Image (tube, grey):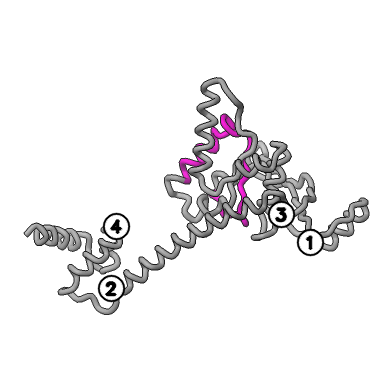
Amino acid sequence: YGSQGTGKTSYSLHVAADVYGCWNTALKHLFFSPLDAIDKMLKTLERLEAGEGERIKVLIMDDAGIWLSKSTWWEDSKQEFAELFDLIRSVCSCVIFNSPGNNVIGRIMNEIMLRVKITEIDAKMSEMLRDMGYKIDSTKYRLAVLYSHKLTPKFQGYIKKEAYDVFPLHYPVYEEYNRIRLKVVKQKLINVKQVLETKRKERMIVEGQINENLLDEQIVELLKLGLPKHRIAKILGISSRTLYDKLKKLRINSLQ
């Protein structure tokens, strides 16, 4: 975890490249989408069931806070993934989650036993490194502070600092990673645009006082936007029963 742009992805890929011995292989095990990661694990599990291959050594979930946000922890997909995480060692030895802060659902956060804070190298750390015989350009390197999450016999959690790790910010597969990331950002922009356009159309439809004579037309327009019926009723300020009666009437008229 750490501020945006500090080097979380860089450190994750450095770790994975050390494990796999290959930068391209490390990048192939980095995922923005949970579906892609699940597909990878399913294929690995099928090989394991056939007595072939081995578990995934390291899998990186980049920007995990986007789809594992604790602000919507009750969603079925997040609960299912949290349950999978209890069993994931059967198919994957290590999962790295990248996130700016503590915004991943608590059930997973509580089970992550190693937490790594990525920061810039400040003047104090630079001086300490020089005293140890390391002369580095602090603009090209970052500091990883490793903490372990432990439990007392009373199952009370506490954090213990374990180690420091200095690593280069640059990594050889940056251009390929950035190409993949830009596709993800583009899709997210498209999704946000669609939501905003839908909201704008909603406001245009219901702008001003609701006119009983226009209510049927407004219902039809909101249905065209693909909105669920409970949301349409809320937008128009009518009861679900009134909406049901209107829809029933509209169906009869359309048949005629």
* Residue at x 29%, y 67% (from the top left corner): 235
Q: Which mark is residue 206?
A: 2
Which mark is nearer the camera, 3 or 1? 1
Q: What is the secondary structure assignment of the residue under circle 4? A: loop
Can you say whether 8 is above or below 231 in the image? above
Q: Is residue 131 left or right of residue 189?
A: right
Q: Residue at 51%, 32% (x, y): give it.
A: 43
Q: Secondary structure at mark 3?
A: strand
In the drawing, does residue 133 fall left or right of residue 53?
right
The residue identified by callout 3 is 118
Amino acid type, mark 4:
Pro
SS label for mark 1: loop
Residue ID for mark 1: 139
- Quadrant in which residue 14 is drawn: top right
Which mark identifies residue 228?
4
- Residue found at the far bottom of this picture: 208
| Residue type, label 2 | Val
Residue 147, magenta (yes or no): no
Q: CA distance from mark 1 to mark 2?
A: 53 Å
For the C terminus, the quadrant is: bottom left
The stretch in magenta equals 78-105
Q: Earlier in the sequence, mark 3 or mark 1?
A: 3
How far is the residue under mark 3 from the one under mark 2?
48 Å
